[in-house]
């Protein structure tokens, strides 16, 4: 009965309120009373249990709770030359498990989002083929399809950290990665349909955006595990991720995952376009640029605690959580250090450990309340071990931007705040 807590009888709810004001109510975790409205806390009947809620279909397309409004993609102002050629980052510190919700997948565009009417969508396949073809979206949907979850990481992820710790939050240092379940046609089937000429060796992938982004792809990868995907996490691709179709190249740098895919040309050598000559190359210490670094090496990051996800308790049982991935296969093991890499303990992998997908790890420990230097180190099934930043710089110098998979360090202070640092 809604009016049960009558004025004549000081209710339990009022008693607790009084207790709170004199500072004597000590229930549960410290500070729990400070947030929200104490009248809605146990053992009271909260407001939301007293009234009917929204009916069905009021929210025709579901959205997160209004209390989660801070969980959004964010950009970095000084990295944003223009809205159309920019990047927004996945809020990794707010997520768990291994699948990235569609609306939170980082986006990277060179000329804004192409708005394509699926009825007008066409994919042209030509060049060194027996039979040039044009596919409609419906045509693509009539090929046998597969479902695969893969991570997609921009080669520039962590690129701003090459010369030292810079951005304060794993959303910014590592948030150019997402992992969704794609539905699509194996590219091999489309190539078989057209028939490859004997001298076919490379493909050109071209996007339908104003940048007409183009990359050369070795035929071997196309025949191996490349997909022309049209769905992510069950629903059609989001416009920002290439609606209605994009290339998925498991384990390879995301720049090659051409969105709004409109043209595939089969040739016998690479095209040496802008994105594989001027950009997406790694300038080494000797002045030479390394080219065609397709595979994303094993990498990991602790997502919580992290600068945007500080510790709110002063000591005691603490859950450390993070992500690991490798372009060469499955993650085999993740080690965690609490002291800047002196001692390592093996983390617990939880959830599916899939080939070339994000893998979730946890490490639970009893925090003594002292400062920590948190690190994680991924190992993949080929035996490759994620290097330290110093090891990377020794081989690659300091001129690089792309392919930074060095070990990240978070400094947890005694008050629970976390900062991006480097240890020597
Ligand atoms: N494809 C087209 N057509 N245009 C682009 O600007 N950007 C590339 C790649 N494919 C791009 C593109 C880059 S650099 C990255 S990192 C990924 O798309 C980003 O994919 P996402 O926006 O789905 O995260
Ligand atoms: Co990119």
Image: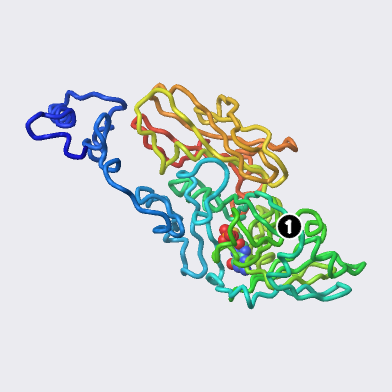
Q: Position of residue 274 (x, y in %)?
A: 66, 70
Q: Residues within 10 Å of mark 1 (few under 14, many from 20)?
A: some
Task: Identify the residue under disc 1.
Answer: 145
Pick the front one: 217 or 362:
362
Q: At 45% across and 49% down in the image, what residue appears?
A: 167
Q: Where, by quadrant of the figure, is residue 207 drawn?
A: bottom right
Q: Where, by quadrant of the figure, is residue 32 drawn?
A: top left
Asked which colour scheme the image uses, the reply is rainbow
Is the residue 21 above or below the residue 143 in the image? above
Q: Position of residue 91 (x, y in %)?
A: 47, 49
Is the residue 314 above or below the residue 231 in the image? above
Residue sitting at the far front: 1
Pick the front one: 299 or 26:
26
Q: At 73% across and 57% down in the image, what residue appears?
A: 145
Is the residue 294 above or below the residue 125 in the image? above
Q: From where the camera sits, is residue 390 visible?
A: no
Q: At 48% across and 24% down in the image, what residue appears?
A: 365
Label 1 within 8 A of ligand 1 by Cβ: no
Q: Position of residue 400 (x, y in %)?
A: 61, 54
In the picture, the quarter occupied by the N terminus is top left
Whether residue 214 sits left or right of residue 308 in the image: it is right
Q: At 69% across and 64% down in the image, what residue appears?
A: 276
């Amino acid at each position: 009965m809604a009016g049960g807590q009558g004025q004549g009888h000081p209710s339990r709810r009022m008693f607790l309120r009084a207790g709170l004001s004199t500072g004597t109510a000590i229930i549960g975790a410290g500070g729990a009373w400070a947030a929200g409205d104490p009248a809605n806390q146990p053992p009271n009947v909260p407001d939301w249990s007293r009234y009917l809620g929204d009916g069905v279909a009021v929210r025709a397309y579901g959205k997160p709770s209004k209390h989660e409004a801070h969980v959004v993609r964010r950009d970095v102002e000084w990295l944003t030359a223009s809205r159309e050629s920019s990047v927004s980052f996945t809020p990794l510190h707010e997520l768990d498990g291994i699948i990235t919700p569609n609306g939170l997948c980082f986006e990277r565009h060179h000329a804004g989002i192409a708005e394509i009417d699926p009825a007008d969508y066409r994919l042209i396949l030509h060049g060194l083929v027996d039979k040039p073809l044009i596919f409609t979206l419906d045509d693509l949907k009539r090929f046998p399809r597969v479902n695969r979850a893969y991570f997609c990481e921009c080669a520039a992820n962590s690129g701003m950290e090459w010369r030292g710790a810079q951005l304060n939050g794993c959303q910014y240092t590592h948030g150019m990665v997402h992992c969704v379940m794609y539905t699509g046609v194996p590219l091999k089937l489309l190539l078989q349909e057209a028939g490859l000429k004997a001298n076919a060796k490379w493909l050109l992938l071209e996007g339908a955006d104003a940048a007409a982004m183009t990359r050369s792809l070795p035929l071997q990868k196309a025949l191996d595990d490349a997909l022309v995907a049209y769905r992510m996490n069950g629903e059609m691709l989001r416009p920002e991720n290439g609606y209605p179709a994009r290339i998925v190249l498991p384990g390879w740098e995301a720049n090659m995952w051409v969105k709004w895919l409109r043209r595939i040309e089969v040739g016998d050598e690479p095209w040496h376009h802008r994105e594989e000559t001027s950009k997406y190359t790694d300038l080494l210490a000797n002045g030479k640029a390394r080219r065609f670094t397709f595979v994303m090496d094993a990498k990991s990051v602790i997502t919580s605690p992290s600068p945007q996800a500080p510790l709110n308790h002063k000591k005691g049982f603490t859950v450390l959580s993070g992500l690991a991935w490798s372009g060469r296969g499955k993650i085999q093991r993740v080690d965690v250090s609490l002291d800047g890499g002196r001692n390592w303990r093996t983390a617990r992998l939880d959830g599916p450990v899939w080939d070339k997908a994000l893998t979730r790890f946890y490490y639970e420990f009893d925090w003594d309340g002292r400062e920590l230097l948190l690190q994680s180190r991924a190992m993949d099934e080929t035996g490759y071990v994620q290097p330290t930043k110093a090891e990377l710089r020794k081989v690659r110098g300091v001129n690089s931007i792309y392919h930074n998979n060095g070990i990240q360090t978070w400094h947890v202070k005694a008050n629970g705040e976390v900062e991006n640092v480097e240890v020597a």
